[in-house]
Image (cartoon, rainbow, N blue to C red):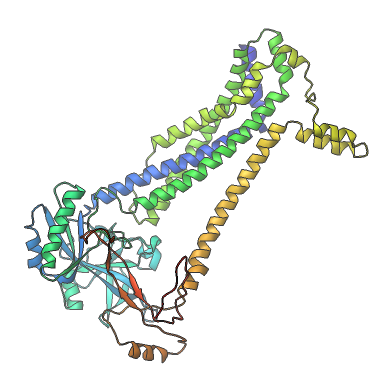
Amino acid sequence: MGVIRHKIWNEVWQHKGRTLQIVFIIAIGAFAIGMIIGGRNMFQARAGESWRASSPAMITLAVDPAVDDAMLTSLKGIRGVEQVEGYIQTTLEWRLAPTDAWQTGGLIARDDYTDQRYNQSQLLSGQWPTRKVFAFEKGDDTAFGLQEGGVVYIRLNDREYTVPLGGVVTNLTNLPPGFGGTAQFYTTRTRLGELTGSTNFNRILAGAPVYDETTVTAIADRMQDRLEKQDIEVTGAAPPPDQPRRVADPAVYYLQSSLDSIFVIMGLMAGLALLLGLLLVYNTINGVVSRQVNQIGMMKAVGAGSGQILLIYLSNILIYGLLAFIVSAPLGVLGAYGLYMFFINVFNITPGPFSLSPPAILAQLAITMLAPILASLGPLRTAVRITVREAISTYGLTVPTGFLERLLAGAQRAPRLLLLTVSNTFRNKWRVLLTQATLVSSGVIFMMVVSTQQSVTYTFGDVLFSILRFDVAFQFEQPERIEQIEALTLAQPGVEAVEMWGLSSPKMWPADRPQSNEDQSVQLFGVPLPTRLYGPHLKAGRWLQP
C-alpha cells in the first residue's frame, strides 16, 4: 500500500499544474450552482418571512367613488369576513427642488399606522407620518434622492406644498423601484383630508379566518355585490399593479413567479458551465490514462489487479474533488450571500441575518465528489481493461491507419514539423471531438447570452419607440375637449404634434360563458385615425379603419 500511496501523492503533487487545472474546473461549476441554490434559498426564505409578517390581505378591492366609515363598518357584517380595513391611495407630483421637473409618485394615507391589520407597513427609521410630516418608502433614497430629515415639494389638486420627510417606511405591496415603481409617500388620513378635501377610503382590505380560494372568492363576491348595490364600482387591486386581482393567497409573495424565472435561467447557465467543465475533466483524465499505459502494464506485470489500478485513479479523482470542494464551498457561501443581498435590494426587502444554506453546501459536495467520477468512468474503464501485452506493445504512436495518416504519408514535400503537428492533433479523434464540442458549446452559450441581451435592448428600445412615437404623455382625471387641449398644447414651444387618445378599462370574458366578478380588466385605447404618434406592428389581420 505504501507504493500505491506514493503513486497517488506523486500524481497530485508532482503535477501541480494539472491538479490546479482540474480542481478549478470542477470548483467553478460547483461554485456557480452552490451560489445560485444558496442565494435562492436565502432570498425566498427572507422574502416569504417578510411577506407573511406584513399580514397580506386576502381580499383587496379598489372602489369608486370612495366609501366612508359607515360603509366600511357595514362590510364587517358580511358572512365570512374576519376583519376589514380601509386606506387611501392616490397619486401626486413631487420634486426635490423648486427648479426640478415634476415627477409622478404615490401617496398612501391610513387612519393609524400603529394599528394596522392588513398589508402592514414597517417603520425602519425616524417617525411615523404625523401632522404635516410625511414618510417615504425604503429604497427611494437611493432611487430618487429622498432623504430622511429633508423636504420635498409636492403638488396635489394644482396646489403646491413643502413637506418635511420624517421617516423611512417599507411596505412590500409597493412595486420596487427596480421593477419600475415610483416614489412612494405616506401621510395620515387627516392630513390627506386637509390637502384634498376627502377622507373616504378608495381601497378596502379584508380577510377570512383561513385562506381557501373558493371560500374567499365567495366572500369577495358578497362584498362586491353589497358595494355595487350602492352604485359603487369595484375592481381588484391586489398586487402586482399590472395584473390586479381581488383575491390573493397571503402565503405567496406576489413577485414569486418573476423570481422563479430568474433563478431557472441562472441555474440553467450554471448547469451548462458545469457540463462544459466536466468535458474538460474527461479529456484531462483520458490524457493521463493514455500517457500512463506503460505504467499500468508494469503494475499489472508485477501483480497489481484491476481493483488496485481503479483505486489509484479513483483516489486521485476524489482528491481533486475534495480540493475543489474546499475551494468552492466558502466562495459559494460568499457568492450566495452577495446574490441574496443583490435581490434583497432589487426587491426592496429588509435583509435578515447572515445564514448558511445546507442544501447548497450539500449540492456542492455532491457535485465535486460525484461529477468528476461520472465524467471519468470512460477513461477509468479503459485503464482497468488494459492487459500486460497491450501495455508492453504500446508506444503511444501505434494507431490504426486511416485516411488522414495515408494522406500525410503521401505528403513528401510538406515540412516534417507540420506533418507531426497535424498527426498528433488528430491522432485521438474522440478526444478531438470532445475538445471541439467544448469549444463550440462555449461559443454557443456566449452568443446565446449576448444575443438575448441585445434582443431585449432592441425590443425595449428601437421597437418600443417605433410603436410609441411620442415623448410626453398626460392622463386627465376627467374627459376634456379635444380641440381645446390640442390647441393649448400646440401653442407651447417645441411641440411638433399632439393627439388625444381615449382610455378605458373594460372587463373581458370568453364569449362562451357568462360574465362573472372574476373577469379580468383590460386597457382599451382609442386612437385617432390617421395617427402620427402610434406605429402599429401587425402580426396578423389588418389595421384599424375609420
Quadrant housing the C terminus: bottom left
Find residue 400 and report its image quarter: top right
Q: Nearer the viewer, residue 73 or 149?
A: 73
Classify residue 13 as left or right of residue 37.
right
* Residue 213 x %, y %: 21, 49
Determine if residue 166 is in view. no
* Residue 242 x %, y %: 33, 62
Find residue 506 and report its image quarter: bottom left
Residue positioned 80% across, 25% down in the render = 397
Q: Nearer the viewer, residue 531 or 329?
A: 531
Find residue 373 and report its image quarter: top right
Which residue is situated farthest in the front direction here? 512
Residue positioned 45% across, 40% down in the render = 333
Classify residue 319 as left or right of residue 140.
right
Residue positioned 69% across, 11% down in the render = 300
Residue positioned 37% across, 88% down in the render = 486
Q: Nearer the viewer, residue 538 or 464?
A: 538
* Residue 168 x %, y %: 29, 62
Q: Is residue 136 above or below residue 257?
A: below
Quadrant housing the N terminus: top right
